[in-house]
Image (spheres, rainbow, N blue to C red):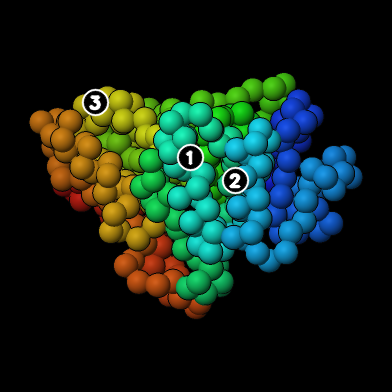
Amino acid sequence: MREIQFRQALNEAMSEEMRKDKNVYLMGEEVAEYNGAYKVSQGMLEEFGNKRVIDTPIAETGFTGIGVGSAMNGLRPIIEFMTFNFSLVAIDQIINGAAKMMQMSGGQINVPIVFRGPTGNAGQLGSQHSQNFENWFANTPGLKVVVPSNPYDAKGLLKSSIRDNDPVIFMESELMYSDKGNVPEEEYVLPIGKCNIVKEGNDLTLISFGKMMKVAEKASNEAKKINISVELIDLRSVRPIDYSTIINSVKKTNRVVIIEEAWPLASISSELSHHIQRFAFDYLDAPIHRITSEDVPFHYAPTLIEEIVPNVEKTIKAIKKVMYL
């Protein structure tokens, strides 16, 4: 099995689906002539031409609306946001257009569209370019929200997202595009809504998704050094959520720590905590502990960013707390 970068896995997923289906196209800022702001669409303009790999003005409301309208008329667009921070100016098109169209049309019109791009903090980008929106979009019925953590998942989940007949929010990270991982050369897809048990354990369930899986994996390795057996779960998607796998894990380990990069209020970890205490309360031997970013706008200074975001040290501290160590 070859090892490729996260960006290449995304590129292969889009290219393979565009070769299979002439209705699939890519549109967004700098996706064509510049080969993508993060080089995710490298070479796609050359292969598919400017009718299917389309550069846009800096006008998210406009090209998002075009994408939604074209999906309603039978095409399968992939709309790339240079960052999901910029999706806010197009959020009406996503929430009140794409997400609601199936219901408003009485099941007559589906919207097979993928909105993809990076989310979250990526270093010194300031407070307006460092926000997480997974929980925002996951709050919307009619949307599916996928947040892969590695190249293998990215390719398999993006292919499934492109084939899906509902609108999908596909969230990546600038800090993951150069990450390498094993990806098969043969075709494969991964189901949306099924999480991955990365590592089985007996003492504690550690849940995360997206680039925070890097923190979770390092923390689970550190926990092993102090004889704590961690069951590590990657959600993969935050709408739908694979609740059954999580509950079964909690019934086995009896303790839970959840890591996510978003702010604490109304977060994915809030929802998971509620669901676990509702359906596995009698199995808990300690209160659920969650680690999120601090409840402040993101800073520019690297030292302050480090204070805000989840890290291994904070995670180990939480693990010891629920283990009463």
Around disc 3, counting alpha carbons within 10 Å, would you say few (fewer than 14), some (14 to 19), or many (20 or more)?
some
Dots 2, 1 in contact, CB < 8 A: yes
Q: Where is residue 144 in the image (x, y as percent from the top left)?
A: 46, 38
Label 2, secondary structure: give it.
helix
Asked if residue 59 lies left or right of residue 262, the reply is: right
The amino acid type found where label 3 is placed reads: Lys
Of marks 3 and 1, which one's residue comes earlier in the chain?
1
Asked if residue 185 lies left or right of residue 325, the reply is: right
The amino acid type found where label 1 is placed reads: Met
Residue reaching furthest to the bottom: 301
Q: Position of residue 261 (x, y in %)?
A: 41, 56
Q: Which residue is drawn at 54% across and 33% down?
A: 110
Q: In which quarter of the image is the N terminus?
A: top right
Q: Nearer the viewer, mark 2 or mark 3?
A: 2
Q: In which quarter of the image is residue 55?
A: bottom right
Question: Where does label 3 land, which residue?
Answer: 252
Q: Residue at x 61, y 28 (%)?
A: 163
Q: How far apart are marks 3 and 1 (CA)?
A: 41 Å
Asked if residue 135 lies left or right of residue 318, the reply is: right
Question: Where does label 2 land, which residue?
Answer: 68
The amino acid type found where label 2 is placed reads: Val
Indicate whether 319 appears above or below 62. above
Q: Where is residue 128 in the image (x, y as percent from the top left)?
A: 50, 71
Q: Where is residue 283 in the image (x, y as percent from the top left)?
A: 14, 30
Question: Where does label 1 land, which residue?
Answer: 101
Is residue 166 in sight in this rendering? yes
